[in-house]
């Protein structure tokens, strides 16, 4: 065999291999795509992320069991609910070309810090629970458009709802409003305060605490007791809310304790203990899965996720993933096609009917805010709309 | 500013501040004892505290099988369980402190390395301990069950004398005075003070330097472990990074009082606890840290050795 024949054979083999790889890639792209789930899977806020992840796994299992033309894989992205962690994990997800859409992040700060990577990569996000108003405000520095969407009502809806629910049935409500100085907590408090005026409640005091593990709540508790408040509203997260309500009850406070969706997880009662958590009023921009799912769906949920009782934002997470699955069913399997589909399409709502998105990423017509109460066993019970 | 809170809650705030301050005192002893003999800050002391809190959780849940919603214990069973948790917490922290001394200080000291090397190796130990706890607990907080019902002995001048607060105040005071007496009166205590005054002279007097330093770490660790137990009794939650803020506060207390000085740590801890509680109540919780560090800077400007740094120099460890 001379040198020329070797070259010709080599070129032919290379062309054959290249063609084979190309064919295999095209076939792979057409039959399997990946959707990422991003949220806090470890850390203080892990309960919220694990709850949502269970909903994600359930909706994905239902879809893949229907023998679709395009199968969907998942990857889990743990941002610990922290903006700084999110900023370090998001670039890796953005670079992963197999990922064509992302459910998350669960938290506003983590979402905002992920935006630079996802906007640059054209990766569409649908969050089940990130509620900071400015994420969908075009003039704001943390605006997530055009990639960011959410299926939860934002804080301008939740704040007044929290004020309404916290003071419901309380004679001459005197409210002490505390926030944790986080972007989420301070934001929710900002929208709760005018809501209190609307329901004719008196704000008898405010405090802005920066909770860490082992924070001493005694000074805030003393102020609440001195103010004679009969309603305390805490805008912050579950573990801290649990520690706060425990300090309040130990200090002798007997009034209403209310908090927003950041506290509506099982971690709240775990941190507080059932006795202190009992009767706490919580709001969440979600309808509980157990209230709308059939017995068969509940069984399938447990089988898919390994979780016996659905936690917070499961329904929203199912809706968020179904946005992508609806588009994939329509043959949209690239980031660009998904982006167009999400911003223009109509999607099934797990509670019935359909929904679509406004231009800046919120659900058209607003999303409902649910009212919850903690019972004597620490379970979070849905009591209706807030 | 909310001065009105002082009219009805002054004594209640004092009691909370005193209880918090005494926890700081016990942790700061870990810093001040080591500084006394080595002239080095033991940056791993915050993680020695963290180990103590996890040891308490382990005894109260793993060993007794209690959950966060179990009924509180009573009588002998309560006393026995709490004492056992206290001893295990102290031992866990004490042994961790000895391990830190052995791994981060002794070898470097034997080789006559730069003091900075020991400082960095202590920071390294601190990170190793903290990150190991983070990985083992998946960064999640761990709650200890309420073994003791938080009953009140009654209200005096508006202050709620709750059993856990009273327990912390009395026990921490007893521990501090016992340690103070030990350091000032016992043979070993005198050896620790001798090393603290002059390492070279102590060596010439036949004092076993390594032994004295190990004992100093052990005592500091035992006190920090006791603080961890009292912390868990009052606050009932811990996490891998629990030591960071408390360690920083205790270190600040030690500096405020005069680091290397036992009684300085005592007054510094109490002053800091009261200052934190009062500033959070009057100015708002968001001003707590600002107030504390403004006061610290002002004190150091006037008295660079801390409030009691010079006045009670003789009692230095």
Image (cartoon, coloured by chain):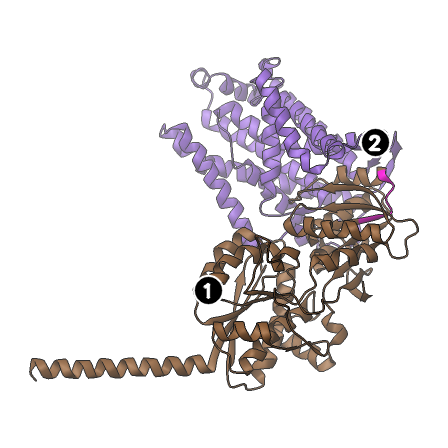
Q: On the image, numbered disc 1 is attached to which residue?
A: A121
Q: Is residue B172 magenta?
A: no
Where is residue A81? Give x, y as percent.
59, 56
Circle 1: element type: helix
Q: Is residue A231 magenta?
A: yes
Seen from the viewer's position, the closer of residues A383 and A142 is: A142
Please indicate, yes or no, whether residue A342 appears anywhere in the rendered image: yes
Circle 2: element type: helix
| In-image side of A21 versus B105 (left or right) | left
Q: Is residue A242 above or below residue A62?
A: above
Q: Is residue A117 above or below residue B299?
A: below
Write down the quadrant of residue B313 in the picture.
top right
Q: Look at the numbered discs 2 and 1 and tell me whether their residues touch, using CB distance below 8 Å.
A: no
Q: Is residue A302 above or below residue A8?
A: above
Where is residue B75? Give x, y as percent.
82, 44
Residue at the far left in the pictured view: A2
Chain letter of the purple region: B
- Magenta stretch in the rendered image: A227-232
Quadrant where the image shows the N terminus of chain A: bottom left
The residue lying at 58 percent from left, 84 percent from top is A65
Chain letter, disc 2 residue: B
- Looking at the rendered structure, whether the residues under marks 2 and 1 are on a common chain is answered as no
Q: On the image, numbered disc 2 is attached to which residue?
A: B4
Where is residue B42? Give x, y as percent.
51, 32
Chain letter of the brown region: A
Residue at the far right in the pictured view: A171
């Amino acid at each position: 065999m001379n040198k020329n024949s070797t070259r010709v054979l080599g070129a032919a083999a290379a062309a054959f291999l290249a063609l084979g790889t190309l064919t295999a890639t095209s076939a792979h792209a057409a039959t399997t795509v990946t959707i990422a789930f991003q949220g806090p899977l470890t850390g203080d806020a892990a309960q919220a992320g694990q709850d949502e992840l269970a909903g994600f796994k359930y909706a994905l299992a239902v879809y893949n069991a229907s023998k679709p033309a395009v199968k969907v894989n998942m990857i889990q992205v743990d941002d610990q609910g922290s903006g700084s962690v999110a900023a370090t994990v998001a670039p890796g997800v953005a670079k992963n070309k197999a990922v064509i859409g992302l459910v998350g992040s669960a938290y506003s700060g983590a979402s905002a810090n992920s935006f630079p990577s996802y906007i640059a990569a054209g990766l569409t996000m649908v969050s089940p629970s990130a509620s900071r108003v400015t994420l969908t405000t075009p003039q704001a520095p943390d605006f997530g458009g055009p990639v960011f969407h959410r299926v939860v009502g934002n804080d301008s809806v939740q704040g007044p709802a929290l004020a309404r629910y916290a003071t419901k049935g309380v004679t001459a409500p005197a409210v002490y409003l505390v926030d944790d100085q986080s972007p989420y907590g301070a934001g929710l408090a900002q929208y709760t305060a005018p809501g209190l005026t609307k329901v004719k409640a008196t704000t008898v005091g405010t405090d802005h605490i920066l909770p860490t593990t082992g924070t001493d709540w005694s000074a805030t508790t003393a102020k609440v007791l001195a103010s004679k408040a009969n309603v305390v509203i805490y805008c912050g997260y579950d573990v801290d809310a649990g520690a706060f309500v425990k300090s309040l009850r130990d200090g002798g406070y007997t009034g209403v304790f209310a908090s927003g969706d950041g506290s509506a997880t099982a971690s709240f009662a775990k941190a507080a203990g059932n006795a202190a958590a009992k009767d706490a009023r919580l709001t969440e921009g979600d309808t509980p899965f157990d209230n709308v799912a059939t017995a068969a769906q509940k069984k399938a949920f447990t089988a898919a996720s390994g979780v016996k009782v659905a936690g917070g934002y499961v329904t929203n997470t199912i809706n968020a993933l179904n946005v992508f699955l609806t588009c994939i069913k329509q043959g949209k399997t690239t980031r660009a096609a998904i982006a167009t589909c999400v911003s223009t399409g109509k999607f099934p709502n797990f509670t019935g009917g359909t929904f679509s998105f406004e231009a800046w990423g919120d659900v058209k017509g607003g999303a409902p805010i649910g009212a919850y109460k903690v019972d004597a066993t620490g379970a979070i019970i849905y009591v209706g709309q807030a | 500013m909310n001065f009105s809170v002082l009219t009805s809650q002054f004594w209640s705030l004092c009691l909370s501040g005193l209880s918090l301050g005494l926890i700081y005192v016990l942790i700061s002893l870990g810093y001040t004892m080591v500084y006394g003999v080595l002239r080095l800050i033991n940056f791993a002391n915050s993680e020695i505290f963290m180990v103590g809190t996890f040891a308490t959780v382990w005894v109260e849940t793993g060993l007794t099988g209690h959950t966060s919603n179990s009924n509180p214990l009573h009588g002998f069973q309560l006393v026995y369980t709490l004492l056992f948790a206290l001893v295990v917490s102290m031992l866990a922290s004490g042994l961790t402190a000895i391990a830190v001394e052995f791994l981060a200080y002794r070898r470097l000291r034997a080789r006559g390395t730069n003091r900075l090397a020991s400082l960095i190796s202590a920071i390294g130990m601190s990170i190793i301990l903290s990150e190991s706890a983070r990985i083992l607990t998946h960064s999640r907080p761990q709650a200890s069950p309420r073994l003791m019902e938080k009953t009140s002995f009654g209200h005096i001048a508006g202050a709620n004398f709750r059993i856990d607060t009273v327990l912390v105040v009395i026990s921490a005071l007893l521990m501090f005075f016992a340690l103070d007496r030990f350091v000032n009166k016992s043979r070993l205590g005198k050896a620790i003070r001798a090393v603290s005054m002059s390492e070279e002279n102590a060596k010439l007097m036949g004092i076993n330097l390594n032994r004295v330093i190990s004992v100093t770490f052990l005592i500091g660790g035992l006190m920090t472990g006791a603080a961890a137990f009292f912390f868990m009794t009052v606050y009932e939650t811990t996490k891998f990074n629990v030591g960071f803020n408390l360690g920083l506060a205790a270190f600040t207390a030690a500096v405020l009082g005069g680091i290397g000085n036992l009684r300085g740590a005592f007054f510094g801890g109490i002053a800091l606890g009261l200052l934190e509680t009062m500033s959070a109540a009057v100015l708002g919780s968001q001003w707590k840290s600002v107030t504390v560090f403004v006061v610290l800077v002002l004190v150091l400007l006037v008295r660079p050795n801390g409030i009691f740094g010079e006045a009670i120099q003789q009692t230095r460890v």
